Amino acid sequence: MYKADYLQKFVQTIFEKIGCPPKEALLASEVLISADLRGIDSHGIARLAGYVRLYDNGRLNPSPQVKVVHETPSTATVDGDRGLGLVVAPKAMQIAMDKADKVGSGWVSVRNSNHFGIAGYHAMLALDRDMIGWTMTNAAPLVTPTFSLDKMLGTNPLAVAVPTRNEPPFVADFASTAVAYGKFEILQRKGLPAPLGWAQDAEGKPTDDSNAVKSGGGLLPLGSDREHGSHKGYGLGAIVDIFSGVLSGANYGPWVPPFATAGFMAAQAGVGLGTGHFLGAMRVDGFRPADEFKNNMDRWIGAFRNARAIEGHQVLIPGDPERESEAKRRQEGIPLLPPVVESLVELSKRFSVNFELVN
């Protein structure tokens, strides 16, 4: 087990080594390690080497000039200048919250960015200001829409964070696919097959091959097949893509540039600038007194917690598993798979940064 503070400092140092200013390297490290703490290992420190590969391939600007290129009192479009999405997205959310302070809600589309880590981190920034946070992003085309053989969409996650009074906040953070691609990476590292319903092979048939995407197949939308509602997952992914890419001027659909996954890095000629995000903040008291709302959110959560559960199970509130994981991992540490440790050791050697192995 590795202590979160130790891993975060290592990540911060690596980002500084590729040219990130200390303040932004610190922010990026906090976003990345928050994924590991919340049990979303697919989007945490395991992706550090991928960000370095983006830098090596000239697709990442470590010191971007993030700027607003268009705005109204309640909306803005932000150009991320090819920066780390881990840094660009929090800055965009800050703009959204500042606009919400003034006019009730703020909505920001982002272009020319890169992978921004877990969507939930950015949505939760709104909680301390009694706001509801929204975050979404498009991603590299690894997903086959219902009945398609071609990969046209990314895993395109969406997160919504809602403040409460005494109960833990409601935080829904999920991909529009059966699972995020990072889950396949974890299975690949372990040499394990994937459950049926996660992917299809190059001929469009169900497969349990965790390397299916690398072999010409694709991830399946949420629902897996038409009979189980994949058209709804397809529609959700399409909405995220349009809000994140078409609305902002970023790339969209099959033109979104890849992250360092699925065995390819080169980005084809695009139809926009970089990867796109969409973030929003809604001031609760723009709709009703915040205290009343938060009291009712507590009551809403309590009702669901008290729902009768199937034997051996418990009815959970979105955000419960991640919150419990964070509490446990802050105390006990973060587990890392051997291939992840190997990648960190390689980075430590390349940048002359110490990385202590834990037995």
Image (tube, grey):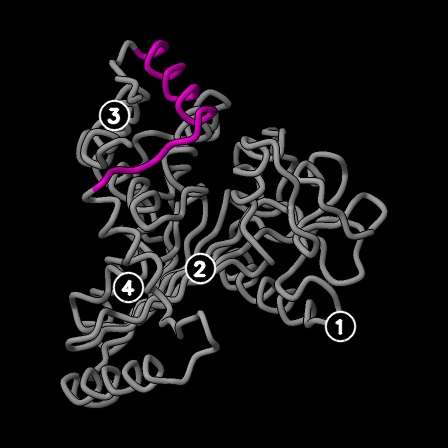
State the CA–CA distance, disc 3 to disc 4: 30 Å
Q: Residue at x 68, y 67 (%)?
A: 230
Instruction: Name the residue carrying label 3.
Output: 10
Which kind of residue does numbered mark 4 sit on? Ala
> Distance from label 3 to label 2 (Cα)?
28 Å
Q: Secondary structure at mark 3?
A: helix
- Mark identifier at residue 96: 4
Image location (x, y in percent) of residue 241? 56, 59
Q: Splitting the image into 4 quarters, where does residue 125 fall?
A: bottom left
Q: Residue at x 27, y 83 (%)?
A: 302
The residue under label 2 is 136
Which secondary structure dominates the residues rendered in magenta?
helix
| Residue 31 spot, x, y in % from top left | 29, 44
Query: Residue 119: x and y, percent?
Result: 39, 55
Q: CA distance from mark 1 to mark 3?
A: 46 Å
Q: Residue at left 46%, top 20%?
A: 56
Q: Is residue 48 left or right of residue 210?
A: left
Amino acid on which the number 3 mark rests in the picture: Phe
Q: Is residue 184 above or below residue 340?
A: below
* Label whose residue precedes the other's in the sequence (1 or 3): 3
Q: Secondary structure at mark 1?
A: helix
- The crowd level at tag 3 (other Cα within 10 Å; few <14, some 14-19, many 20+) is many
* Residue 272 in view, yes or no: yes
**Which of the two marks, 3 or 2, is nearer to us in this view?**
3
| Image spot of residue 94 (x, y percent) | 24, 57
Q: Earlier in the sequence, mark 2 or mark 1?
A: 2
Q: Kindly report which numbered mark, 1 or 3, lies closer to the viewer in this rendering.
A: 1
Amino acid on which disc 2 is placed:
Met
Q: Secondary structure at mark 2?
A: strand
Asked if labels 1 and 2 touch by Cβ distance under 8 angstroms, the answer is no
What secondary structure is found at the residue carrying circle 4? helix
